[in-house]
Image (cartoon, helix red, strand yellow):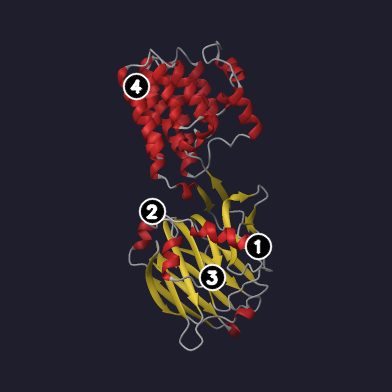
């Protein structure tokens, strides 16, 4: 439907009112999808992308919008169509402004190599004013990329009654001495209570965690259906979780003499220390192992990155290093995953899920090498996005724009803009 509205704008040359209305509808439809974290375009296949990048057709050759699409395949992408529309309407500043506003939002959300190529070709062929505007758009998007952590471009989106990731009931839980659950989360503001995880054996023994208002509720389940709840006040952090990513780590350690200890870390910093009975690890087999789902609470609602269950109780220093906001940033989790995958004893991890390694059949591979491949519930999907800086990589990176400096039609002001753009791309 977005493409149809753009086609109407391109073909309704003499009806300015229709053009504006169609473009407004296209923007509304596209922004609605972005708000739902749904890509306006599906990612092109490798073969299609190769065909598009090798195509030698010139933007100025086709005479109609239909022939343009046929001769230049990347225009099938919404970004490509918007760029061609900008070329056709560059004499109308109002339309161009609306087109470029929508274009900026789409590129910030997700940019593919074919989109970067379309943008580059359009800048080459655009008039001076449109070229200046497109360079501004490119710089804006590159600067925006720096604010979006690459780590959080690959997320699990969980919405609806049936959301979560289900680990196999046969998953071995080597939790005799302790465990650590960690993930980065962005929480839905409209859902007061939601599950974080539930690991319980067939007899009910186990542990769970859930967010309830401005509290994190930790629970331990033992024999005969008895359980203990431990509310952990978030002290106002819940509101921040609606807009800001928060790395949550829960460390539960079994003690032989003293009371079993449980620690909660937010963004690598110790937030709470208390005591919670440790369940009988031998009774936790063959049961219900879920991320984002528990029997007592609604499913997790929001976004989650890299939910991981380790078979050891991490130290303060290790939790601080694992948090993606650590300074300086570390790759210790990736190192542990690599070591665990090649080790004979894989007990350091129980499972680790990455949104980038999920199949269309809703299977999410366990990247820890523990073979605890998970099942995505109907309300869960993996979303993988790319930045414009990454999309420019196969084309030579942001430095490719330096070629514009050899174009005699580029004004001194645009030359400065190109240099700033390249600098922004190199920083990213």
On the image, which quarter does residue 423 sit in? top left
Instruction: Give whichever of discs 1 and 3 has the lower sequence position.
Output: 3
Q: Could you say which is closer to the camera, residue 56 or residue 103?
A: 56
- Rendering coords of residue 219 (x, y %): 50, 76
Residue at 53% of width from left, 22% of height from top?
A: 7
Kindly give the residue lying farthest to the left in the view shown: 413
Task: Give me the C-alpha separation between circle 3 and circle 2.
Answer: 26 Å
- Circle 1 residue: 372
Callout 1 touching callout 4 (CB < 8 Å):
no
Residue at 44% of width from left, 63% of height from top?
A: 248
Kindly give the residue lying farthest to the bottom in the view shown: 257
Disc 2 versus disc 1: nearer the observer: 1
- Circle 2 residue: 244
Disc 4 versus disc 3: nearer the observer: 4
Residue at 68% of width from left, 50% of height from top?
A: 361
Q: Residues within 10 Å of mark 3 (few under 14, many from 20)?
A: few
- Circle 4 residue: 415
Q: Residues within 10 Å of mark 2 (few under 14, many from 20)?
A: few
Instruction: Give whichever of discs 4 and 2 has the lower sequence position.
Output: 2
- Rendering coords of residue 233 (x, y %): 37, 71
Instruction: Give whichever of discs 3 and 2 has the lower sequence position.
Output: 2
Callout 4 touching callout 2 (CB < 8 Å):
no
Callout 3 touching callout 2 (CB < 8 Å):
no
Disc 3 versus disc 2: nearer the observer: 2
Task: Give me the C-alpha separation between circle 1 and circle 4.
Answer: 53 Å
Q: Residues within 10 Å of mark 1 (few under 14, many from 20)?
A: many
Identify the element where label 4 is drawn: helix
Q: Residue 133 vs residue 112: left or right? A: left
- Circle 3 residue: 296
């Amino acid at each position: 439907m977005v493409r149809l509205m753009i086609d109407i704008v391109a073909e309704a040359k003499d009806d300015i009112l229709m053009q504006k209305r169609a473009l407004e509808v296209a923007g509304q439809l596209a922004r609605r999808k972005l708000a739902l974290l749904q890509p306006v375009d599906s990612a092109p296949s490798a073969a299609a992308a190769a065909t598009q990048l090798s195509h030698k057709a010139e933007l100025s050759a086709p005479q109609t919008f239909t022939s343009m699409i046929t001769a230049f395949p990347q225009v099938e992408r919404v970004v490509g169509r918007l760029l061609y529309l900008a070329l056709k309407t560059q004499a109308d500043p109002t339309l161009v402004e609306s087109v470029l506003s929508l274009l900026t939002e789409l590129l910030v959300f997700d940019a593919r190599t074919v989109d970067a190529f379309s943008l580059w070709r359009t800048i080459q062929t655009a008039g001076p004013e449109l070229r200046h505007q497109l360079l501004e758009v490119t710089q804006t998007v590159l600067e925006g990329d720096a604010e979006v952590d690459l780590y959080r471009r690959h997320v699990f989106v969980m919405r609806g009654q049936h959301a979560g990731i289900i680990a196999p009931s046969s998953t071995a839980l080597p939790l005799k001495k302790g465990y650590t659950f960690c993930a980065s989360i962005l929480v839905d503001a409209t859902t007061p209570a939601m599950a974080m995880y539930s690991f319980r054996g067939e007899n009910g023994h186990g542990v769970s965690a859930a967010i309830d208002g401005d509290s994190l509720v930790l629970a331990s389940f033992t024999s005969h259906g008895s359980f203990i709840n431990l509310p952990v006040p978030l002290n106002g952090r819940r509101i921040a979780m609606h807009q800001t990513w928060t790395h949550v780590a829960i460390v539960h350690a079994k003690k032989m003499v003293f009371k079993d200890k449980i620690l909660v870390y937010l963004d690598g910093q110790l937030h709470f220390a208390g005591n919670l009975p440790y369940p009988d690890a031998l009774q936790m087999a063959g049961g219900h192992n879920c991320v984002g789902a528990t029997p007592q609470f609604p499913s997790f609602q929001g976004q989650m990155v890299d939910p991981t269950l380790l078979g050891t109780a991490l130290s303060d220093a290790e939790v601080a290093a694992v948090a993606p906001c650590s300074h300086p940033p570390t790759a210790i989790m990736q190192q542990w995953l690599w070591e665990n995958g090649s080790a004979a004893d894989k007990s350091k991890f129980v499972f680790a899920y990455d949104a980038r390694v999920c199949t269309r059949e809703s299977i999410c591979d366990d990247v820890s090498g523990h073979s605890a491949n998970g099942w995505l519930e109907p309300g869960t999907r993996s979303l993988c996005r790319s930045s414009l800086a990454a999309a420019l990589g196969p084309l030579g990176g942001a430095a490719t724009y330096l070629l514009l400096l050899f174009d005699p039609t580029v004004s001194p002001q645009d030359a400065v803009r190109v240099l700033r753009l390249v600098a922004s791309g190199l920083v990213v």
